Image: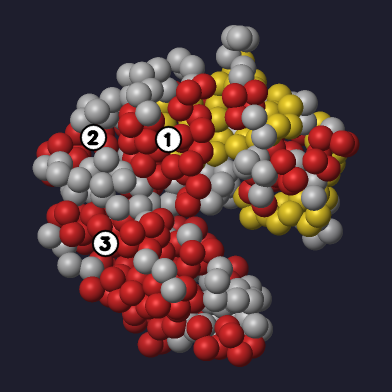
């Protein structure tokens, strides 16, 4: 077994974000080990030895080129050998499975970073590792959002459309966040310290802009196959009012834990410089939303990922803290009917995050100090 290398990153997941991250890291001179559960997605990269990062015609400043990937495997033990940083870039619905696969192979000093955690990702992964008896000195952390806007064009070929300037990242316990940022700084300056994992989790703005807008535009999506502007046409004043109510419920749940969350309207100003007296006005003022089409189908990650991994954990925490979330619960109910499933059962609940039965004090200690049940 080799020593851990600070210049070796394992990228776990070969979808849009994973391919972009692996290619960009490799072009930066980082040794990259790429893992994916299904081998089919990896075969073109294994044959060629590289990922083709396609140039963007209107953004020559973005990375491009043939990125050499020395280890491409569906064996997770091989993928994480030598790697100091394990960048998990899979849908949030796969976080628990990745944690289960990692558990037997983790080593002291490794850092797991979820890109992103959605709501409660780091807490769920930590809980799964504990359930599997992991006692290694491993840090579990999560990014607030995915660093890249990207799309896989063909097997082994990906294009980056944008890279965020700043993405908060936080660890459990919170005092270990500087270690995570330092380890990431070998390759990235964009990751900055977040307050704690509950702040990164509850500031998951996708929970506000994705599920409800998709549910409320279901007929239009099905009749036009998504041929309308998602944010500009899909968010009318009435829809925006519902989003503001969902947002208020999210902020109230965080406040009950003693954490201040950024409102969706504040986030639009911070992220895009878009302002308005209402959320509707702020959305209309955001030039970055113009031209973005709606999903072509209802069975889309805006529901299948964002409902169970964003809305369900917020409502579950609300139940635990006696904070009513009727609007969030209504959207989850409608999503269940539309998809013919039960996201309350499959979603990320307080129990799955290892928080069920904790007092408010114990919950805060878990998040801030990691001493409810430590990985070590």
Q: Quadrant of residue 228?
A: bottom right
At mark 2, the secondary structure is helix
Q: Position of residue 69 (x, y in %)?
A: 77, 31
Mark earlier in primary sequence (3, 2): 3
Mark earlier in primary sequence (3, 1): 1
Q: Position of residue 129 (x, y in %)?
A: 38, 30
Q: Quadrant of residue 329?
A: bottom left
Residue that sits furthest to the front in the current view: 340
Image-based side of 123 in relation to 273, left or right:
left
User: Could one spot residue 169 in this view of the protein?
Assistant: no
Q: Position of residue 324 (x, y in %)?
A: 17, 67
Q: Is residue 194 above or below residue 274?
A: above
Q: Which residue is nearer to you in this view: 356 or 163?
A: 356
Residue appearing at x 45%, y 86% in the figure: 236
Residue appearing at x 48%, y 60% in the figure: 305
Asked if the residues shown at circle 3 and circle 1 are in contact, with their CB atoms under 8 angstroms apart, the answer is no
**Would you call the spot at circle 1 few (<14 residues within 10 Å), some (14-19), or many (20 or more)?**
many
Mark 3 highlights which residue?
Answer: 315
């Amino acid at each position: 077994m080799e020593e851990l290398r600070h210049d070796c990153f394992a990228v776990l997941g070969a979808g849009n974000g994973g391919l972009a991250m692996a290619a960009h890291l490799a072009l930066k001179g980082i040794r990259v080990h790429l893992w994916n559960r299904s081998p089919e997605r990896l075969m073109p990269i294994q044959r060629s030895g590289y990922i083709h990062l396609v140039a963007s015609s209107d953004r020559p400043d973005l990375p491009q080129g043939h990125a050499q990937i020395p280890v491409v495997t569906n064996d997770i033990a091989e993928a994480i050998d030598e790697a100091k940083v394990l960048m998990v870039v899979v849908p949030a619905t796969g976080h628990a499975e990745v944690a289960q696969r990692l558990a037997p192979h983790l080593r002291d000093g490794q850092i797991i970073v979820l890109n992103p955690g959605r709501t409660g990702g780091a807490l769920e992964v930590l809980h799964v590792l504990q359930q599997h008896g992991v006692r290694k000195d491993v840090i579990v952390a999560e990014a607030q959002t995915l660093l890249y806007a990207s799309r896989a064009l063909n097997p082994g070929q990906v294009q980056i459309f944008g890279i965020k300037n700043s993405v908060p990242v936080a660890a459990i316990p919170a005092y270990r966040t500087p270690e995570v940022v330092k380890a990431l700084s070998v390759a990235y300056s964009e990751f900055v310290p977040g307050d704690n994992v509950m702040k990164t989790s509850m500031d998951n703005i996708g929970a506000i802009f994705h599920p409800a807008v998709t549910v409320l535009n279901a007929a239009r999506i099905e009749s036009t196959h998504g041929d309308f502007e998602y944010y500009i046409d899909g968010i009318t004043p009435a829809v925006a009012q519902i989003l503001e109510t969902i947002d208020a419920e999210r902020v109230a749940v965080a406040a009950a834990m003693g954490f201040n969350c950024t409102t969706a309207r504040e986030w639009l100003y911070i992220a895009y410089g878009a302002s308005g007296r209402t959320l509707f006005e702020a959305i209309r003022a955001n030039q970055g939303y113009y031209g973005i089409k709606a999903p072509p189908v209802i069975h889309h990650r805006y529901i299948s990922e964002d409902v169970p991994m964003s809305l369900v954990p917020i409502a579950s925490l609300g139940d635990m803290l006696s904070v009513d979330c009727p609007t969030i619960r209504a959207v989850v109910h409608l999503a269940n009917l539309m998809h013919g499933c039960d996201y309350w059962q499959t979603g990320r609940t307080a129990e799955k995050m290892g928080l069920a039965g904790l007092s408010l004090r114990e919950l805060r200690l878990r998040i801030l100090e990691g001493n409810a049940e430590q990985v070590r």
